[in-house]
Image (cartoon, rainbow, N blue to C red):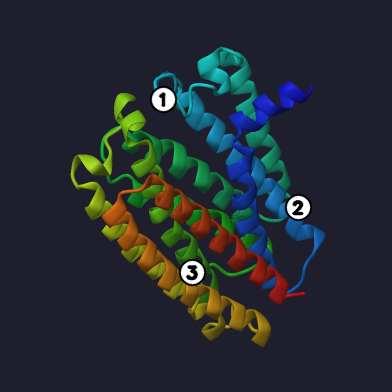
Amino acid sequence: MKKAFKNIAIFGKFSISLPIALSCFIAFVLFNEQLSWEGVLAATGIFFMSAGASALNQFQEQNRDKLMRRTQDRPLPRGIFSKKKALLTISCFCITGTTILSTFNLSAVIWGWAGIIWYNLIYTPLKTKTAFSVFPGAVVGAIPPIAGWCAAGGSIVDFRIHFIAFFFFLGQMPHFWLLVLKYKNQYKNAGFPVITDHLSNSQVVRINLIWFIATFISALFLPILDIITKEATSWIAFLASIIMIIWVVKSTMETIQARSPQLLRKQFIYFNSFYLLIMLLVIADKI
């Protein structure tokens, strides 16, 4: 039973679907201005939609996954899941997510499916055609907060949800390119075009610095736009952003000079930790 759950969790990328669900929950809380079980339910719906999209992605790329060390232990490449079982699991994820989101409103369902359509029908095919697929792919990160906002009854024309979506969009760039720098050889062996086919490692690291700084600066606007309203949480967000800007400039220069993969790993961990901190601050601000 434990092994079966582990395989399902890998197939649905639960480790990634959880923070995606959290971004949905944050937007729900932001509009609702309080913590509620309804927000948890909406986030659960997006969790299953994300798991469905991730599983469908693995189904689409199962032959390429066999060629990469980081993905060859997934259920389909290892033969643990048959194609029939994989499709059944994908259907269960998507049906469960749709059913949950339908308890809120049609907009929540539409945005839930928009994420799947964009990720699996637009981004996934583009990955095999261009090294710059990260730009349309980053849109995927902006969709779950919109779904949470709409589930809570928020208007799609409200500037706050546009900024939150933009904030999550920005974070997809450095996140993905750090992965490419780490696993570029595996991506190339599997037939994926990578950004280092066009730019040197140092150039990618420098460009990534711009995306890092843009993300940290955008966090400074959260109190200005009344997304974070309390003084304590505003100061924490401000100090965290400034510290990260200083640190990422320093670590980027060290990375270029030393070419150390350990520094890239630290950037990946610290950057994602920063996002988690900001998400928790938004939630704490409403308590």
Name the amino acid, label 1: Met
Identify the image quadrant of the N terminus.
top right
Q: Which residue appears at 62% of the width and 69% of the height?
A: 154
Q: Position of residue 67 (x, y in %)?
A: 39, 20
Above or below — where is 64 with respect to 264? above
Q: Which residue appears at 69% of the width and 28% of the height?
A: 6
Nearer to me, 6 or 269? 269
Please tell me the numbered disc located at residue 162: 3
In-image side of 138 versus 81 (left or right): left
Q: Position of residue 261 (x, y in %)?
A: 38, 45
Label 2 environment density (alpha carbons within 10 Å; few <14, some 14–19, many ≥20): many
Query: Are the residues tagged 1 and 3 within 8 Å (C-beta)?
Result: no
Between disc 1 and disc 3, the foreground one is 1
Camera sees residue 275: yes
Above or below — where is 250 with respect to 192? below
> Sequence order check: which comes first, mark 2 or mark 3?
2
Q: Which residue is mark 2?
A: 41
> Sequence order check: which comes first, mark 1 or mark 3?
1
Q: Which residue is mark 1?
A: 68
